[in-house]
Image (cartoon, grey):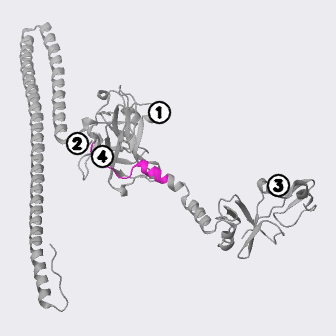
Amino acid sequence: MALPRPITGNTAATLSSIVALCDAVDPLTQDVADLQAQIAAEIAARQGAVAAASRALDAQIQAAAITANQTVYAEAGYRVAHINQAVASVTAACTALVQAEAEARIAGDADAVEAVAAVRARLDGLSRRLAAAEADTVAARRAAAIGTARPGETLAAFNRAAAPEALAGPRAALAPLGPEDVTPSDAGPVACLIGAGALGMRRAVAIEEGRLYRLRAVIRRVVDTPDPSGDAVRAVIVALDQSLALLPGADGIAVGRAFPALTVADGRQAVEVLFARTLGLGGALTLSPRARFAVGAVVTYGDAATTAVEVLDVADVTGQFLQDAPTAAFEGRLAALEHGDLPARLAVVERAVGTPLTVSFGSKGDAQAGAIPESAQLVALLGRAHAGDGGAGLYLRAAGPVATGADAFTSHGASFVRVPIPADLAAAVIDAGWQAWLSGLPRTRPTEPGVTWFNGGVPTVTVARPVVP
């Protein structure tokens, strides 16, 4: 329905149109307010649903963690109780043997004494094995509680070797870290490498096709050397085949991040490198397709520097695609660009744009009327009268006067002479006839460029030398 319009000079009609406009706007205003209320209610409902889902997810995670901890503690408690029972049995047996030995000595039975001593030695060995099993159980319980990413807290999960290649092979053959490899720090216990060596995981992580993995390491230089340039530190991935053997050649060790001259002043260095054995997953590194297992390691070089390893871990992050800090691959590509002498190449391009040696026009008339830079030595025409008419050619800047009749043009005082090509000579011959054209050629070499002359029976064209501005 059309609203009444204000009428100039008619106050009553104008007021009536304003009242009608207000009456039409009021329902729309109410509709907007209702819509805003609905939107606010929808937002509140969705926020409530998200918050409820988040609380439910947190509750599930907490419940799963509690269940896992209860399972671990129950298993560890069962094993410890079993071991304690076995130890008690061994203790009782030893007590009985000691009593029997005493009684045998009293009776003077030498054979019985020797037999009891042999049994007692075997029981002592069994006691030591049970004590070692109990220690392993406690270590496993502690590792399950705090994780296996911190070498200073889970010694059994890491190994120290002379080189990263030594981290290959059966995992049970790798000796765990000892207390002498750990030192306290402000970040808690950390494993230390003095001089050259490698600290790696005893656990080999299976590398599956189509999965993305992350190497994470946190390192810090603890003691510097007078010349840190030769004391590099690298976070690497040791690639193993299905039998846990090191892949041959360069496929065996993949460098995730390198610190050529790490010092104490550099502080804590965190490394996160994505890798996979499949292309196209966003990994910074692509291992050999033959890789089946991966081991994270920190490798140090030099003789005297001390390096602390706070964290070392390899984890499956498929679906997360977390991008790490600039990686060695990115830095390598950046270095390649820097070594490509881009400033000098850009200067050449800018010089070619600012002071070109060649310019192009559509026709001779365009070139005569156009502006030709003083640096231009050659003019390319796409045609004589217009572009594409078959008269395209190159015209060279003349150093002096142009010969009469030469194919040339002048632009703002500068002359340009056509560079003859076989097609031009053929056209001239056809137009004048061979004999007439040949007899008309001068017998001495002209001084002007672009002129054909009879050079010992061979038609020759004089060529102008470029003018150096």
Q: Distance between the residues labelled 1 and 2?
A: 34 Å
Earlier sequence position, callout 3 versus callout 1? 1
Earlier sequence position, callout 1 versus callout 4? 1
The three-letter amino acid code for the residue at tag 4 is Phe
Earlier sequence position, callout 2 versus callout 3? 2
Q: How far apart are marks 1 and 4 (CA)?
A: 29 Å
The quarter of the displayed image where residue 432 is located:
bottom right
* Horizontal relation, residue 301 to residue 139: left or right: right
Of the pair 427 and 404, the residue shown nearer to us: 427
* Residue 220, position as x, y percentages in the image: 33, 51
Q: Which SS class for mark 4?
A: loop
Q: Which SS class for mark 2?
A: loop
Q: Do the residues labelled 3 and 1 touch (CB within 8 Å)?
A: no
Residue at numbered disc 3 = 430
Q: How far apart are marks 2 and 3 (CA)?
A: 97 Å
Q: Can residue 196 be seen by looking at this rendering? A: no
The quarter of the displayed image where residue 463 is located:
bottom right
The three-letter amino acid code for the residue at tag 2 is Glu
Earlier sequence position, callout 1 versus callout 2? 2
* Residue 78, position as x, y percentages in the image: 8, 29
Residue at numbered disc 2 = 153
Find residue 249 and name its label. Answer: 1
Marks 3 and 4: which is nearer the front?
3
Q: Are marks 2 and 4 in contact (CB under 8 Å)?
A: no
Earlier sequence position, callout 2 versus callout 4? 2
The three-letter amino acid code for the residue at tag 1 is Gly
Q: Distance between the residues labelled 3 and 4?
A: 73 Å
Of the pair 34 and 10, the residue shown nearer to us: 10
Looking at the rendering, the stretch of residues picked out in magenta corresponds to 319-335
